[in-house]
Amino acid sequence: MKVIGINGSSRKDSNTTILIKYIFKELNKEGIETELVTLYDKKINPCRACFACNSRKKLCL
């Protein structure tokens, strides 16, 4: 089994990050594989409601 945690906090060392890492540490002790995906370092623009995603069949992020 693999658990993927998605951290949407805008801060690198947020409380959310600390909590996810603690949970992952406990899961790893049980032999469960984990992966942390952080969004704070990604450039994600808000939706502009241009509907380009509908015409191109892709995401506009």
Image (cartoon, grey):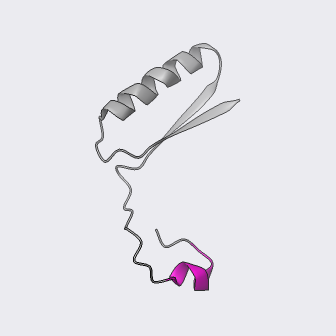
Q: Quadrant of the N terminus?
A: top right
- Residue 56 falls within the magenta-colored stretch: yes
Furthest toward the front, the residue is 49
Residue under the point 63% across and 27% down: 33
Magenta residues, dominant SS class: helix
Q: Residue at x 41, y 50 (%)?
A: 39
Q: Which residues are magenta?
A: 51-58
Residue 54 in the magenta stretch? The answer is: yes
* Quarter occupied by residue 49: bottom left
Q: Position of residue 23 (x, y in %)?
A: 49, 22
Which picture quadrant has residue 59? bottom right
Which residue is found at the position 52% from the left and 83% from the top?
Answer: 52
Name the spot of residue 9 as percent of width and height, x first.
35, 44
All told, the count of numbered labels is 0
Would you say 53 lies left or right of 19 here? right
Locate residue 24, reporting x and y percent.
Answer: 51, 24
Q: In the figure, 60 relative to 16: above or below? A: below
